[in-house]
Image (tube, rainbow, N blue to C red):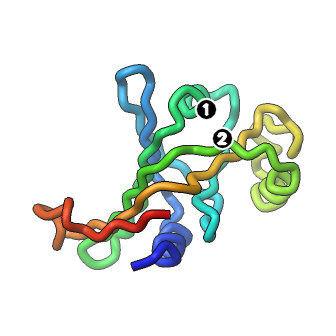
């Protein structure tokens, strides 16, 4: 197994549950991943949101992707968020997700718009086969 399989699975199953921390309280919410490629898993959020504050304070996250096909497969990814202040990425984002302009983002340079990725970490796949042997599931470092 290599990272390209992780990228493929993420792009085919972009709904992601992202776990953060708020002090000593875990927080989890669903995100619609923007895209994944060889450089990581890409997302966006708004800077007025609690999740942005949580990620700025503690960039460690766990991502969980799920495919219900068959008996179900989950991919779990542990890593750290990296915020990207890249004009070309933000232009692409607003072009691909124009609905952002309808929910209060004025454009790609709006300071309320934050793009982030998880570029380094560890991923593994889980199925019912590993249910009692999760620690034995092969890991992919990226």
Is residue 115 found left or right of 11 in the rendered image? Answer: right
**Residue 123: % across, % down:** 40, 62
The residue at 16%/73% (across/down) is 129
**Coordinates of residue 42 in the picture (x, y in percent):** 63, 56
Rendered residue at 50%/67% (across/down): 10
Tell me the crowding category of disc 1: few under 14, some 14 to 19, or many 20 or more residues within 10 angstroms, Cα based: some
**Residue where numbered disc 2 is placed:** 45
Looking at the rendered structure, which numbered label has been put on residue 38?
none
Tell me, yes or no, whether the two marked residues, 1 and 2, touch with CB atoms within 8 Å: yes
Name the residue nearer the viewer: 139 or 52.
139
- Alpha carbon of mark 1 to alpha carbon of mark 2: how far? 7 Å
> Of 142 and 101, which appears nearest the observer?
142
Tell me the element at label 2. Answer: strand
Residue at the farthest left position: 132
- State which quarter of the image contains the N terminus: bottom left
Q: Is residue 106 left or right of residue 30?
A: right
Work out whether residue 114 or residue 31 is closer to the camera in this orientation and state it.
114
> For the point 68% across and 42% down, which residue is it?
83
Tell me the residue that label 1 is attached to: 52
User: Callout 2 environment at 10 Å: few (<14), some (14 to 19), or many (20+)?
Assistant: some
Give the x, y percent position of residue 8.
52, 76
Asked which quadrant contains residue 75, the reply is bottom left
Residue at (61% x, 32% y) in the render:
52
Q: Is 15 placed above or below 58 here?
A: below
Q: Secondary structure at mark 1?
A: helix
Q: Position of residue 26 (x, y in %)?
A: 37, 31
The mark nearer the N terminus, 1 or 2, is 2
Q: Is residue 120 above or below residue 36?
A: above
């Amino acid at each position: 197994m290599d990272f390209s399989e992780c990228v493929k699975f993420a792009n085919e199953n972009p709904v992601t549950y992202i776990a953060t921390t708020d002090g000593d309280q875990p927080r989890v919410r669903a995100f619609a991943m923007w895209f994944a490629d060889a450089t990581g898993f890409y997302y966006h959020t708004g800077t007025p949101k609690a999740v942005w504050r949580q990620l700025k304070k503690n960039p460690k996250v766990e991502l969980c992707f799920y495919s219900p096909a068959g008996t179900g497969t989950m991919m779990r990814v542990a890593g750290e968020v990296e915020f990207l202040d890249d004009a070309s990425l933000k232009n692409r984002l607003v072009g691909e997700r124009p609905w952002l302009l309808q929910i209060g983002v004025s454009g790609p340079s709006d300071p309320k718009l934050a793009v982030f990725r998880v570029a380094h970490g560890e991923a593994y796949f889980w199925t019912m086969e590993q249910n009692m042997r999760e620690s034995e599931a092969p890991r992919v470092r990226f």
